[in-house]
């Protein structure tokens, strides 16, 4: 599972700053409290941050070290503080070196693990799409273009299901073309008017999306998606789902 390691940048900086300060005063025999209560507070808050972040990310050794340090009295002097901070720093460094960390391009960061990429209205109308919308954004941020499009097609399928239930009263999970054909046949029996035209246009769009994106994404091919194409499909699917919600389609 992908995890957010950003908190460790803050923890690392705070740990290094405290250690540098402790080493600076270590030979003076100065008590932490002599320079103010903020020194003790900074030490305690850092231990709590390390324990929580390491526990959440499975860095159990460092989490246990921090947990034990929390229940002990705060070091009386900077000289006593230095070895505790060094041991925590070494343990954290050792555990992080065994992790695989991905860098996200700043231009794509806004897509990573976001729950609102299609807007709150689509989220409310199609709650079952939440996971795939988030996954599509995260895959795009990580430059996994094919995976991004795959999740977008799962979002679209729920839109097709909503249209099928609206027009046919049911949804048979078969190939898209069969569903589209059944909807086309049923729409011929609807009274002419704006609503029928909207449903016909939506159904036609599903046919286009099936041929242009879904079939391509579900089969082996020698024309892989690139980032611009994945973003174009992402924006197209988002606009389409927003239009479905705007016209009253929902789960």
Image (tube, grey):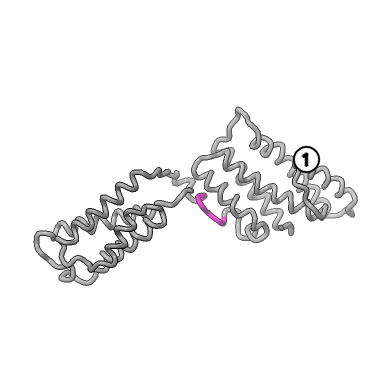
Q: Is residue 102 left or right of residue 156?
A: left
Coordinates of residue 189 in the picture (x, y in percent): 90, 51
Q: Is residue 69 left or right of residue 167?
A: left
Please tell me in which quadrant of the rendered image residue 102 appears: top left
Q: Quadrant of the C terminus?
A: bottom right
Please tell me in which quadrant of the rendered image residue 70 appears: bottom left
The structure residue drawn at horizontal position 38% and vertical position 45%, both measured from the top left corner, is: 99
Q: Image height check: is 223 above or below 94?
A: above
**Is residue 44 found inside the magenta-colored segment of the image?**
no
Coordinates of residue 56 in the picture (x, y in percent): 41, 57
Coordinates of residue 103 in the picture (x, y in percent): 42, 44
The structure residue drawn at horizontal position 22% and vertical position 58%, both measured from the top left corner, is: 84
Q: Is residue 162 left or right of residue 63?
A: right
In the picture as drawn, the residue positioned furthest to the top comes out as 222
Residue at numbered disc 1: 177
The structure residue drawn at horizontal position 61% and vertical position 45%, both measured from the top left corner, is: 151
Of the pair 82 and 160, the residue shown nearer to us: 82
Coordinates of residue 17 in the picture (x, y in percent): 24, 57
The overriding secondary structure of the stretch rendered in magenta is: loop
Q: Image height check: is 95 above or below 49?
A: above
Query: What residue span does the magenta drawing correspond to?
Result: 111-116
Q: Residues within 10 Å of mark 1 (few under 14, many from 20)?
A: few
């Amino acid at each position: 599972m992908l995890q957010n390691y950003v908190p460790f940048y803050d923890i690392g900086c705070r740990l290094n700053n405290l250690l540098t300060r402790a080493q600076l005063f270590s030979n003076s025999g100065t008590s932490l409290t002599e320079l103010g209560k903020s020194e003790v507070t900074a030490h305690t808050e850092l231990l709590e941050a390390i324990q929580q972040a390491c526990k959440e990310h499975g860095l159990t050794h460092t989490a246990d070290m921090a947990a034990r340090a929390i229940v002990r009295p705060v070091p009386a002097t900077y000289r006593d503080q230095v070895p505790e901070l060094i041991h925590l720093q070494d343990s954290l460094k050792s555990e992080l070196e065994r992790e695989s960390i991905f860098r996200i391009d700043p231009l794509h960061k806004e897509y990573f693990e976001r729950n609102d990429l299609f807007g709150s209205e689509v989220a409310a109308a199609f709650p079952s799409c939440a996971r795939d919308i988030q996954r599509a954004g995260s895959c795009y941020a990580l430059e996994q273009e094919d995976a991004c499009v795959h999740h977008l097609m799962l979002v679209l399928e729920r839109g097709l299901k909503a249209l099928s239930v609206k027009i046919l009263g049911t949804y048979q999970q078969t190939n898209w073309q069969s569903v589209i054909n059944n909807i086309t046949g049923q729409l011929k029996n609807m009274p002419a008017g704006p609503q029928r035209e909207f449903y016909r246009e939506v159904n036609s769009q599903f046919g286009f999306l099936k041929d242009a994106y879904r079939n391509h994404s579900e089969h082996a091919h020698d024309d892989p998606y690139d980032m611009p194409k994945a973003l174009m499909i992402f924006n197209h699917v988002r606009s389409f789902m927003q239009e479905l919600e705007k016209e009253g389609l929902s789960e």
